[in-house]
Amino acid sequence: MSYAPPNQYPPNQYPPQPGHSPQPGHHAHPLQQGYPPPQLQGYPPQQGHSPQPGYQGYPPPQPQQGYPPLGPAPPPQQGYGTHYQQAYPSQQGYAPQGQYPLQQQCPSHGQHAPQHGYGQQPGPPHSGQYQTQQPAHVYGAPPQSMPTPPTPGYGPLSQPLPDAFVPASDLRKAMKGFGTNEAAIIQVLAHYPGEAMDHLKNTYQQQNKRALETDIAKETSGYFETGLLSILHGPLMHDVHTLHKALAGAGTNEALLNDVLLGRSNADMRAIKNAYQSTYKHSPEGAVAGDLSAKTERLFSMVLSATRAEESAPCIPQAIELDVNEIHKATEAKIGADQLVVCSILSSRSNGQIRAIAQTYEQRYGRSLEKVLESDFSGHMKIALVAMVRKACDKAMHDAIGLEETMAGMGTKDEMLVARVVSAHWDRNHMGQVKGAYQARYKKDLVTRVKSETSGDYEKLLVAMLN
């Protein structure tokens, strides 16, 4: 599939924002919460959650919704989206990204698509679009790169702990005595920072000499209970429990497996593997190998090795050209795809490098890399490789499509809907991007769509996370 250019998300209907000149042809229209990914200063890592604002009293303040959001930029994180702070002029076809050295050589998030709209072929490549000079290190030596830090919730705390005394007291009050105040529980848990969830649970335990999760499970039920307990797990343990659920019992929930493992940073992948081993007393590599087979198992073995290029690694033109040639020779240029060649490339490159590969492939061969993968692969392998490219090229659109998949057709895949909303909601700015992407693709409001598929307290919890 093709992706619309950043200035096409949402359609050309937005009022100019402070500090930005309006685009030609724009008309006044309500904001769609900051989607698409703006032209950024530096490459934004994509694989986990960006920092949640600290809990500031009760109820917490509403996040900024305009484009670009105001306020100081947080440190770059490899998270589920990122906080976008200001537009940046493009540099020879790509917007510079991230705060890491040499990141400006990779194409910016969302720039896989042609810049002049859906359905049109991109123009010829710009000369020097990845890098205009040779790397500063000795030619032929591996490029230097800085390790991507773990996403908030996957490593040490990235900010001071928020207040937990008041929200813990409010939660106990909502469940104490006769009846349960579900609205009060939603108000606290749908907005509390994910990386501080253990702090909230510990404070509740100290105050009341009882476990918060036990009380929630006793006082609620159904998918409302599932959603609340998923939030209480926090970002890392939510992934760990979701991964275990994907592998438990007969068969494999391939969609949940893909959600947890694909497109993750090395730091986040190591955190997931260590937490899974500690929780279930066996390795995720062994569990995945036991559920998958043949070349799909090999792909996920590569993914679990946590040896991707870091997001600070540059996109060197010669290396990108080589990868594009190898993918073409392994797919369209022969009968029968050489699956492991493609798996090896996509599982070992950074998101920025995958974006450069996808853009270069389409410029050279006139066909999107995603379409090639869809036609030359099948089954779980096809779905996984397409997801890796989508997450790298436009994570907000990937997540928007994923949410629609849980609601399309007969019946709602509630378990998957809960898991995906919880995963996306840790980063409020990214959630705004997802809602804008959903509006751009499906011409309908995501919140309204979710309301049409759910009801009761379950519906109210999902809507609170979406908002």
Image (cartoon, rainbow, N blue to C red):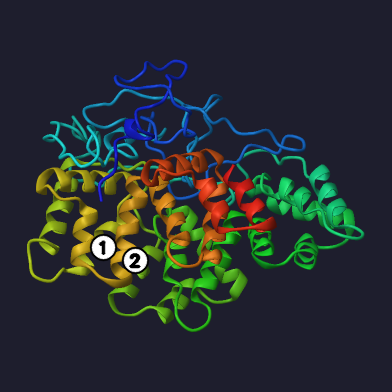
- Tell me the residue at 37%/22% (across/down): 27
Earlier sequence position, callout 2 versus callout 1: 2
Rendering coords of residue 61 (x, y %): 68, 33
Q: Are the two marked residues, 2 and 1, in contact with CB atoms closer than 8 angstroms?
A: yes
Left or right, residue 32 beside residue 71? left
Q: Mark 2 = which residue? A: 302
Furthest toward the bottom, the residue is: 250
Amino acid type indicated by mark 1: Ser
> Relative to the observer, which residue lies in front, 135 or 444?
444
Which element carries disc 2, helix, strand or loop?
helix
Give the answer, above or below, for where 413 lies relative to 97: below
Which element carries disc 1, helix, strand or loop?
helix
Amino acid type indicated by mark 2: Met
- Tell me the residue at 31%/23% (across/down): 89
Left or right, residue 103 beside residue 157? left
Circle 2 residues within 10 Å: few <14, some 14–19, many ≥20: some
Q: Mark 1 = which residue? A: 344
Viewer can see residue 118? yes
